[in-house]
Amino acid sequence: MTDRRRVPELWPRLDVTVRDLPLGILLLVASAVPALHGNGTEIGGLPNRPVDALAGVAAVLQCLPLAVRRRWPLVCLTLVSCGFALDQLCGYHLVAGTALPIALLSAGSYLERYRRATPVASSVAFAALAVALHQRGPGKPVAEFVTFYLALALAWGIGAWMRSVRAAEAERRSRVAEDARTAERTRIARELHDVVTHHVTAMVVQSEAARYLTASPDRLDQALAAVSDTGRRAITDLRHLLDLLNPDHGTGHCGEDRTPPVGRVLTLVEQTRLAGQPVEFAEEGTPPASTGSADLVAYRVVQEALTNALKYDHGSRTSVLVRHGEREITVEVGTDGSGSRAGSPGGNGRGLEGLRERVDMLGGDFSAGRRTGGGFLVRARIPAGSPA
């Protein structure tokens, strides 16, 4: 039973020549069956001739080259055509003649070089064969040769169509793979932006504040401790991102999953407060049993909004509200505009745009803009339970 199950699995792993050989052998065996003699392909109307050694040569030339019809399609077509011409000119009319359209179909599908020259050369060769058969035979109508030629042309056309379909599928797969790589690079860039920008901004602001605390050793020590703590958090988050790039990630070799839940928003708030930003935090409702990736997106919304508050409205009153509904998480982060621009690296708007794309991917709503009375408000409604 085990061996039977292995056969379908082993067959695709065999060399393509080995997989194509049985078809040629089947036609060769059929050509050797006495009851089928003279019942093969016939054009030109020559009388059937008894099978002899030369018939065996014609059968072998037509059948066995099918083993290389995909590896060397031009070699296969040439040998099969020679065997077919010998078969028809001698009047054997073997079943092996069926190999010619198969060889043409394979050449149209797999031939890489001489694709234009091959149909021309094949047409010339068939014309020469038709003339020879017409002269040696009873003078069959030309329409018979034309009909057979069109049938052979159809086989080539089908092969060419199969080739184009394969090429289109390969291009589609390549495009999908490239889109996947681009999406993954974009995702990693967003994660790096969220982690690095937030932590570095906090460290810059904390360091700037520490310069004015030299007269107060206790407060200076507290500020420097906050810088060190922020740096350690940055290193931890960066290590997590590097783990995501590890091929073994998710197989138990890269540690536990560190997807930040909304519960860690309080840590972000405390870190921002240490940087000198007065933040009011409120959380309403009970988190749903299954939040999917909504937790992570909500966390990133708060992180980016607090980072922007530190950079562009430092010292202003900032409010953070996280509201848990039955099927969604709502996040609101706003400032009152009473602060000043911090001495920190500027931005290019990529953070908010990345948040908008994240929320949109989950089917939520995202808005960010200035308030009429001053300040800035970031609001996101994120459906819970959406897959990552």
Image (tube, rainbow, N blue to C red):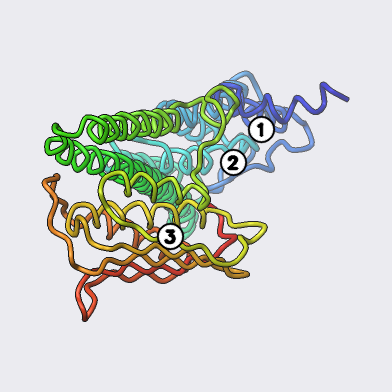
Residue 171 in sight in this render: no
Alpha-carbon span between mark 2 and mark 3: 81 Å
Contact between marks 2 and 3 (CB within 8 A): the answer is no
Identified by mark 1, the residue type is Leu
What residue is pinned by disc 1? 27
Q: Are marks 2 and 1 in contact (CB under 8 Å)?
A: yes
User: Does 319 sit above or below residue 76?
Assistant: below
* Residue ID at (47%, 34%): 85
Q: How many numbered discs sit on the rendered protein?
A: 3
Q: Decide: few, some or many residues near mark 3? Use Cα within 10 Å; few <14, some 14-19, many ≥20.
A: some
Please name the residue that numbered disc 2 is placed on: 98
Front position in the image: 67 or 5: 5
Q: Is residue 368 above or below residue 127?
A: below
Residue 269, labelled with which disc?
A: none
Relative placement, left or right, of 58 versus 30 is left
SS for callout 3: strand
Amino acid carrying label 2: it is Thr
Which residue corresponds to mark 3?
A: 281
Q: Position of residue 70 (x, y in %)?
A: 48, 31
Closer-to-camera residue (317/222): 222
Question: Looking at the rendering, which quadrant does residue 369 occupy?
Answer: bottom left
Image point (58%, 36%), residue name: 91
Asked if 300 appears above or below 252 in the picture, the reply is below
Front position in the image: 291 or 388: 291
Report, in whole angstroms, how far the alpha carbon at label 2 lies from the one at label 1.
Answer: 8 Å
Q: Residue furthest bottom?
A: 372
> Where, quadrant-wise, is the N terminus in this rendering?
top right
Q: Nearer the viewer, residue 348 or 116?
A: 348
